[in-house]
Amino acid sequence: MFAKKSLGQNFLMHAQTAERIVQAAKLPEGALVLEIGPGTGMLTRALLAQNLKVVAVEADDTLAPELEETFAPEIASKQLKIVHADIRNFDPSIIEGEYHLVANIPYYITGEIIRSFLTAGHQPRSMTLLVQKEVAERIARSKKESLLSLSVRVFGTPEYCFTVPRGAFRPAPNVDSAVLAIRNIDSEAFSDKSKENYFFSVIRAGFAHKRKRLAKNLEDVASVEQVTSAFDAASLDKNIRPEDLSLEDWKLLTQSLSNSS
């Protein structure tokens, strides 16, 4: 099977790694799982072996029918459903009831997938993702926050589960990977969509220009007076940089900015 660069494909080839991913997901018995990019079906097989129900979304025109043929018995028994689509065009609201996301996702759309599902109207209860090691570390282990780590932490609890060496894939990527779990995803992290949108507009502005101080960056979304007042209310140093604020600092700052607007 040839991997397509245009789809960012790196096929997982180790059955033991696939089984470890399923174990790391800590899924309840009989859970419904949404899998992105099943590829050759290595992870799909491990999920099915645990008697989980799986909806697998595959964009590859060649792989989708091959998966339907390979897993014909599981499809017939309704344990598995193959959806031939690009995950970026997939609407999770069509999934009935609670579900969990488990996937080996292409590096180039990692951030997009994480953000889109965490902010979706029908969020997964948990996400267990095979991603670039550096990304997993930045989200779950780094002492410095980033736009992506804050986007995750505001909704759930990230955990760096284990490292997966590049040799576990075909073709082998240039970097190692890691399994990142996002647990306890909170559908009520924001009281309404307008507050969620405002929070993200503030943190995006905060990280927009890396060489500038946070206070200066925030002038893109508020006046100098409002920023000064919000910093005073949140007891923040005027020279602090965006990566040095904790999630709680950001929440307080956003609330202070909202109150002063």
Image: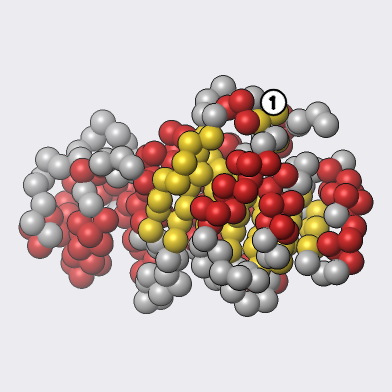
Q: Position of residue 250 (x, y in %)?
A: 24, 56
Q: Which residue is drawn at 27% across and 40% down?
A: 144
Q: Where is residue 198 in the image (x, y as percent from the top left)?
A: 36, 63
Q: Quadrant of residue 5?
A: top right
Residue 74's place in the image compared with 108, above or below, is below
**Residue 133 relative to residue 221: left or right:** right
Q: Which colour scheme is used?
A: secondary structure
**Residue 28 relative to residue 84: left or right:** left
Q: Residue at x 38, y 58 (%)?
A: 157
Residue situated furthest top in the rendering: 174
Q: Residues within 10 Å of mark 1 (few under 14, many from 20)?
A: some
Q: Nearer the viewer, residue 191 or 153?
A: 153
Q: Do we see residue 201 in this rendering?
A: no
**Residue 21 relative to residue 46: left or right:** left
Secondary structure of the residue carrying numbered label 1? loop
- The residue at which mark 1 appears reads as 171
Q: Where is residue 133 in the image (x, y as percent from the top left)?
A: 47, 35
Q: Quadrant of residue 120?
A: bottom right
Q: Nearer the viewer, residue 15 or 163?
A: 15
Q: Position of residue 191 (x, y in %)?
A: 37, 76
Quadrant of the frame with the N terminus: top right
